């Protein structure tokens, strides 16, 4: 058996492509109104709107499904969460002395701080603004391939702190239907990103298709963005301070927006006693879910990086014209067919790839045999995807 070594310069080519598809189940582009939560997770029993136990998983996160969770076909699309550096916004695990701030919101803030920064002392910074609390949208890992595609994020929020386009620009303008339209700033920043422990970091801004509205990503009082986007980890962290409704109570347009049955997204930050959390309005993870589902517009694509390695196997005119098939030889080792002496002709059906130890690693099958003799040459392109 004769083997021919590939020339790395002329016979091997590596190419990388990006494949973009819809993230949501069923290749749905926009979740729209296909968003459901489980009352069992939220309340501990059917019919309740907020958790009774301070250790309920819903204080940590709220899973959002594409169908009624009671259906066997329902799949989690993303999770909504709220975190606070000092533990406000969710009840303490116990009311014992010294347990203040030991609760779900503090755990969530610490968890994502560790993921992004790798240590416990760095707070989240949005532009130049340091925020004590965050909202989190975490896309379920089963929904995307290698990561989320930049510039495809289109998240609308209802009840967010934004004002009409005709008023002062303290906050970014709402869209015509009263919703705040968010995207990442990957196009505006020309793809420049901050590298973190969970990959690239972009700003979340008011705008569309990776382009922010205005001249800067610092759209809130000229100092802060609406959040941070981590496409490689499938996570969007929102600046909870950007959605305080009290900051715009004097603006009549903003009051009208918040009054039109939209759920205000300003976080509830009462004391740590469970008795302080008595209604669904005190349930911050539910608020985030309502803000997203109320706007009924959540688009983000999944991105997969496919690396292809091409091998160009060349059979020159003087190569591979004979066969090692034992049926072509008699018992004494002579060729059975005289034509294989004066005018040999073979048919190539398979190309094998071997390592330096002559061990077969991969096999490429041809769709049909290729005739080969001293008057013919052949070139085979072999593609390996990984």
Image (cartoon, rainbow, N blue to C red):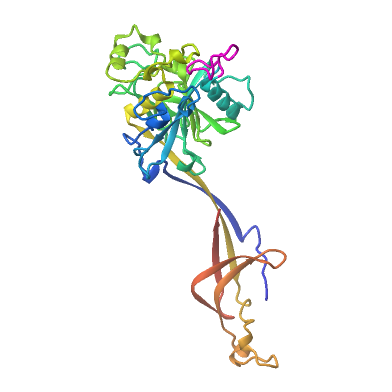
Residue 338 is inside the magenta segment: no
Instruction: Name the one closer to the observer, 355 or 310.
Output: 355
From the image, give the main secondary structure of the stretch colored magenta: loop
In this rendering, position of residue 370 left or right of residue 254: right
- Residue 383 lies, in percent from the top left, at 54, 60
Q: Position of residue 297 (x, y in %)?
A: 34, 32
Q: Residue furthest top?
A: 250
Q: How many numbered markers are drawn?
A: 0
- The quarter of the rendered structure image containing the N terminus is bottom right
Give yes or no for residue 94 being in the magenta stretch: yes
Please tell me which residue is depicted at 58% across the width and 70% down the height of the picture: 351
Q: Give the range drawn in magenta.
A: 86-102
Position of 181 compared to 332: left or right?
A: left
Relative to 169, residue 108 above or below: below
Q: Which residue is drawn at 42% across and 28% down?
A: 44
The reply, left or right, for residue 341 in relation to residue 17 is right
Q: In this view, does 383 lie above or below 204?
A: below
Residue closest to the eye, 270 or 248: 270
* Residue 17 percent coordinates (x, y): 51, 48
- Farthest residue toward the right? 357
- Foreground of the two, 299 or 32: 32
Determine which quarter of the picture holds residue 324.
bottom right
User: How far across and how far down the image is residue 320, in percent?
Assistant: 62, 77
């Amino acid at each position: 058996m004769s083997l021919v070594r590939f020339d790395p310069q002329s016979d091997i080519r590596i190419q990388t492509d990006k494949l973009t598809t819809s993230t949501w189940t069923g290749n749905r582009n926009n979740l729209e109104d296909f968003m459901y939560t489980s009352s069992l997770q939220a309340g501990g029993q059917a019919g309740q709107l907020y958790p009774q136990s301070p250790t309920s998983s819903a204080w940590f996160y709220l899973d959002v499904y594409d169908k009624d969770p009671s259906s066997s076909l329902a799949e989690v699309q993303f999770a909504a969460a709220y975190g606070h550096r000092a533990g406000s916004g969710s009840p303490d695990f116990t009311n014992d002395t010294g347990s203040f701030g030991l609760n779900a919101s503090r755990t969530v803030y610490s968890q994502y701080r560790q993921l992004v920064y790798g240590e416990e002392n760095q707070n989240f910074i949005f532009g130049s603004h340091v925020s004590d609390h965050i909202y989190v949208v975490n896309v379920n890992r089963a929904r995307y391939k290698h990561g989320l595609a930049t510039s495809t994020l289109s998240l609308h929020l209802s009840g967010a702190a934004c004002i009409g386009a005709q008023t002062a620009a303290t906050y970014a303008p709402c869209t015509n239907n009263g919703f705040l339209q968010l995207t990442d700033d990957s196009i505006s920043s020309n793809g420049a990103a901050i590298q973190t422990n969970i990959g690239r970091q972009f700003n979340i801004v008011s705008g569309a298709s990776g382009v922010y509205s205005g001249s800067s990503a610092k759209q809130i009082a000229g100092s802060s963005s609406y959040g941070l986007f981590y496409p490689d980890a499938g996570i969007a962290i929102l600046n909870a301070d950007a959605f305080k409704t009290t900051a715009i109570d004097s603006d009549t347009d903003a009051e009208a927006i918040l009054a039109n049955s939209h759920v205000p997204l300003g976080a509830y930050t009462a004391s740590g006693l469970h008795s302080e959390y008595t209604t669904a309005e005190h349930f911050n993870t539910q608020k985030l879910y309502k803000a997203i589902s109320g706007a009924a517009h959540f688009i983000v694509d999944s991105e997969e990086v496919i690396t292809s390695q091409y091998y160009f196997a060349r059979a020159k005119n003087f190569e591979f014209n004979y066969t090692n098939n034992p049926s072509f030889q008699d018992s004494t080792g002579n060729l059975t067919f005289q034509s294989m002496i004066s005018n040999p002709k073979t048919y190539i059906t398979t190309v094998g790839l071997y390592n330096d130890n002559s061990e077969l690693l991969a096999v490429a099958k041809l769709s049909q045999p290729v005739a080969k003799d001293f008057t013919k040459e052949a070139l085979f392109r072999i593609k390996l995807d990984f």
